Image (cartoon, rainbow, N blue to C red):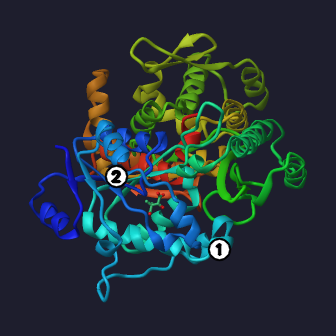
Amino acid sequence: MNKIIRKTEDLEQWRLSLKSDINFIPTMGNLHDGHQKLISIAKSSNYNINLVSIFVNPLQFEHKEDLKSYPKTVDKDIEIAFSNGADVIFIPNTIDIYPKNNKSISYLKASKELSSALCGLTRVGHFDGVCTVVYRLLKLIQPKNLYLGEKDWQQLLIIKNLVEEKKLNINIISVPTQRDSDGVPFSSRNKLLSKNEREILKLFSNELSHAKKIFKKDKKIDLKKLTKKLESKNISIEYLEHLHPYSFKKVQAEDNISILAGAIKCGKIRLIDHVFLMKRNPIIAIDGPAGSGKSTITKLIAKELNLLYLDTGAMYRAISWLFKKEKIDYDKETELKTILNDISIVFKPNSLSQQDVFINNFCVTEAIRSQEISSIVSKISSIKKVREFLVNEQRKIGQSGGLVAEGRDIGTTVFPDAELKIFLTASIDERAKRRKSELEIRGTEEIDFNQLRDFIRKRDFEDSTRKISPLKKAKDAIELFTDGYSINEVVEKIINIYNLNVPKEIQLE
Ligand code: PAF
C-alpha cells in the first residue's frame, strides 16, 4: 500500500476503516539515514501498517528564521519514506493540525522536571510545542507503536512521559542515534552547515565519543577540563552537562550509566549530541522464590538480549553436589575452608545452545537438578562461608556487566547496583505445578503434587528466615506475579521494562 494523506478528515476516515495496527514514525521531513533506520526497523518488526508523518511544527521553533530556514524537501522525502517501508505518508498543513478556533486542540506543557535541563533551559517553549504536536498526531493516528530516535534523547523522555501521563496505550520503541562515517549524528540541520562548520561538529562528536572511552577506563570525567579542551578547538558551547540519563539530575557516585550531553553553535546553527557513559555494561538481576520460573525466564532473556546468563542457583547446587559426593562435613569450618579453596565452577555453552555447569571439571548440569540436591541446597546455601565464596565469584563474573543473573539474593546482595531488578513470584500451587512438569520432562523421578507443594512451602520458609541473605525483595525491585502468564509474556514484560531503563544504544555495545 503506498498512500499519501493530506487532510485530517481523510486520515480519520481511513483510520475508521483500518483493521490493522499502526506503527507511527513522526518526522519534520528532510529525511536522512536516521529516519530511514526508524522506518525500516518499524517495517521489519511486525506486520502493522507503517505510517510516516511529515509536518514541520511551527510551535517547536523559538525563532522565525530557524523555522524559515528549516530544510523542506517533501518530494524527495516521499520517495525515501516509501522506499524504506512506509505504507502511508501523512503530510498535513499547519491549518489542518492547528485549525483556528478549534477548542478540541490541547496546547500542552512538557514535564517540568524533564524540560528544565539541557535544551529546555534555552529553547523556551520548544518541548511544549513538541508535546502539543505529538499528542495531536497520536490522537489522530492512534498507533500501537511509536518509533523515536535516541538522537533527541530529551525529547524521547518527554514524549514517554507524555504517553504515560495521558495513559495512552502506545508502545514507544527507541532507535539508537545513527551516525555518519565521520562520527557526526544524522540531523536535518546538518544540511545547513558549511564545510568548516561541519568540521567543528565532527570535532565535537569525536571528543564526546573519546570521553566515553576514557570514562569506561577511569570511571570519572572532568567536565571543566573537557569544556576547556573543546573551547580551545574553537567549539562554541551552549551547554555541556554530565547528568543522570533519566532524571537529568546531578550524577551520583553509585550511578552506573550517565549521559554526557551538549549543544554547540556552528555559525548560526545550533546542534546537539550526546553519549552515554558507563562504568560497566548493564546488569539485570532476577530474584524470587523457588519455582517462580527464574531459570527458564532468565535463560530466554539472556538469549533475546544477547547477555551472559549467570545461573547462581546452579552454583549453589553444584557445591551441594560436590559436598555430597565428597561426603563433606560442612558443619566443620576447617573442612569447609579446605574444600572451598579448591573449588572452580565454570559455565560453558553446549551444543544445545544452552550452558553446562562444571565443578572441578565434573559436568553436573543434569545431576544438580535432582530432588536429592534440591533437598539439601537451601541448607548448604545458608552457610556463611559458602555464600561469601560464591558471592565473590559471582561479582568477579559480573565485573564488566553485560549479564542477566538469577538467584535468591542477586538484587539485594550480589548486584545491588543492577540497572534492572525483577522479583518474580507465583503462588505455591502454580510453582508446584511448574516443578512437577519440569521433573516429568526430565523423566528422572516420580513425585506427588502435594508433596512438592509442601516441599516448596518449607523451602520458602527456610529461604526467607535464614540469617544470611534471606529471600527478600530488594527495595527498588519490580515485582512480577506470574500466575496466569505464559513464559513468553513474562519475558516480553521484562524486556519492555529493560528497554525503559537502559538506552538502546548501550544495549547493543
Ligand atoms: O523529532 C522530530 O522530528 C520532531 O520533534 C517531531 C517528534 C516529529 C515532532 O514535531
For this rendering, which residue is in front, 149 or 100?
100
Percent across and percent down for residue 395 are 70, 36
Mark 2 to mark 1 CA distance (whole Å): 39 Å
For this rendering, which residue is in front, 335 or 21?
21
Q: Residue at 84% x, 39% y: name it.
A: 218
**Image-based side of 326 in relation to 462, left or right:** right
Question: With respect to residue 152, does 390 lie above or below?
Answer: above
* Local SS, label 2: loop
**Image-based side of 98 in relation to 191, left or right:** left
In the rendering, which numbered label is found on residue 116? 1
Q: Residue at 42% x, 82% y: name it.
A: 107
Percent across and percent down for residue 333 are 77, 32
Percent across and percent down for residue 495 are 43, 46
* Local SS, label 1: loop
Dot 2 amino acid type: Thr
For this rendering, which residue is in front, 386 or 24?
24
In this rendering, the label closer to the viewer, 2 or 1: 1
Mark 2 vs 1: CB contact within 8 A: no
In the rendering, which numbered label is found on residue 482? 2
**Image-based side of 250 in relation to 492, left or right:** right
Question: With respect to residue 282, does 363 lie above or below?
Answer: above
Q: Quadrant of residue 399?
A: top right
State how many labels appear. 2
- Locate the C terminus and report the quarter of the image it occupies: top right
In this rendering, does residue 280 appear at all? Answer: yes
Q: Residue at 58% x, 29% y: name it.
A: 315
